[in-house]
Image: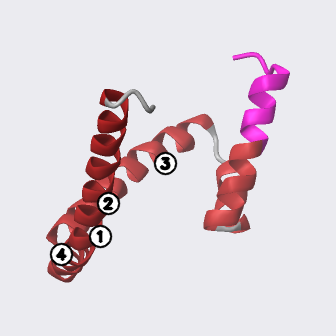
Amino acid sequence: MAKTPSNVSAAAKLEKALRKISGDEVADAILECSPEELRARLVKLGTYEMETLKAKEDDEALADATELVKTLKAPYGDAIKGVNAQRQFVSVQLEKAGQA
């Protein structure tokens, strides 16, 4: 692929983000890779991603915390739904009365 200004700019943005997230060492190591090493790295990254997602799925403490957050948030969601339902009903009543 030819280096056009748009893909050079996108690559620079990706590199900057990677350096911020993973550090200079990771970005520098990637820049030094041959195409074969880059392909191998992609395979390893895919494996690592699957392992991480599986660990997240199996994390009981995280599942418990997620459930707790859902339980704690529920009353607020219900209250907002009630407010929205009342607002819509009030608007309909005003329209019926010709006051909207």
Instruction: Residue 57: give x, y in percent of width and height.
Output: 18, 65
Give the answer, above or below, for where 55 lies relative to 93.
Answer: below
Q: Is residue 21 above or below residue 69?
A: above
Q: Which residue is mark 3?
A: 41
Which residues are drawn in magenta?
Answer: 1-12
Instruction: For mark 1, give the secondary structure.
Output: helix
Q: Earlier in the sequence, mark 1 or mark 3?
A: 3
Helix, strand or loop status at disc 3: helix
Q: Which residue is mark 1?
A: 76
Q: Residue at x 79, y 21 (%)?
A: 3
Q: Earlier in the sequence, mark 2 or mark 4?
A: 4
Residue kind at label 3, given as amino acid type: Arg
Residue in the picture at 72% in, 49% down: 15
Residue 23, given in percent of the width and then of the height, sits at 68, 68
Q: Is residue 9 part of the magenta span, yes or no? A: yes
Q: Are marks 2 and 1 in contact (CB under 8 Å)?
A: yes
Residue that badge 2 annotates? 80
- Label 2, label 1: how many angstroms apart (C-alpha)? 6 Å
Q: Quadrant of the C terminus?
A: top left
Quadrant the N terminus occupies: top right
Depicted 42 relative to depicted 7: above or below:
below
In the image, taking residue 37 as reference, residue 90 lies left or right, namely left
Residue at left offset 40%, top offset 52%: 44
